[in-house]
Image (cartoon, rainbow, N blue to C red):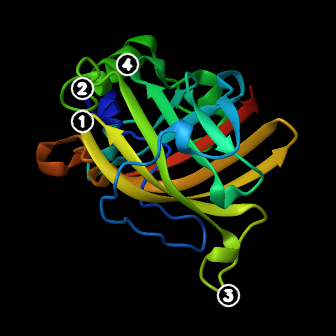
Amino acid sequence: MRKGLNAAALGLLLAGCGAPPARLPGSHPGAVPPASPPAAAPDARGAAYRIDAAHSELRLLVYRAGAMAALGHDHVIVNRALEGWVRFSGDVAGAAFSLTLPTSGFVVDDEAARRQEGADFSEVIDADARAGTLRNMLGPAVLDAQAHPAITVRSVSIATATAQAAGAAQAAGAAQATVRVSVAGHESSLIVPFTVDSSPGRLHAQVDLTVQQTRLGLTPFSVFLGALRVEDQLHVKLDLVAVQD
């Protein structure tokens, strides 16, 4: 896959994202029909928080597939240029947020990030291959970054664990957000499970899920009649910190 497959690497997010129909261990949330646009920041109640880019990160794990998969690579793609706001009054279910990910912030196969992700990403990827992957990922066939320089995720509604199905195992601080995601000119309404911790003046949310590129309106890269391709599913990790203004 070197440059081509690598690139495809991403029907991103995103995702992230903020994110789409996904699954966490033990749960299988699905997509929801398109919803009306979420409320703007002034309509949301609670204190204003801003995304702290210095302590936030979107991470995408992208895997090769097909009979010729050995010719390609698995990839780690990160974005630490996150921007946005959160409104929070102490009740997660009453919160609202908006997240923007500039496509210029994507970094492909950062060596430290690859080491952190273990054996699947132990192979060293040279600078030319990394540059080719990023160039292709941002090109018209995938993210079309020139026409769409940012990915956006905005909340429509949020439900806490107590409002979810009875009997389902839930982690402390578990919730799920219905969000509107815009990627490369395509909009989707999705459900994203997450956990959140709050402390005075600070919020910390985490997302860990699998998402399909095709659910975001993106087409996974494929050559040789599919013998060499990028898996439709992406592993999305979002670590988000917001601080009170």
* Helix, strand or loop at mark 4: helix
The nearer-to-camera label among 2 and 4 is: 2
Circle 4 residue:
129
Q: Nearer the viewer, residue 31 or 115?
A: 31
Circle 1 residue:
185
What is the distance, in whole Å, between disc 1 and disc 2 at their CAs?
9 Å
Above or below: residue 126 compared with residue 4: above
Quarter of the image for the C terminus: give it.
Answer: top right
Q: Earlier in the sequence, mark 4 or mark 1?
A: 4
Q: Amino acid at mark 3?
A: Gly
Q: Amino acid at mark 4?
A: Ala
**Is there a contact, CB below 8 Å, between mark 3 and mark 2?**
no
**Is there a contact, CB below 8 Å, between mark 1 and mark 2?**
yes
Q: Label for residue 144? A: 2
Residue occupying image coordinates x 62% and y 29%: 113
* Helix, strand or loop at mark 1: loop
The answer to whether residue 232 is visible is no
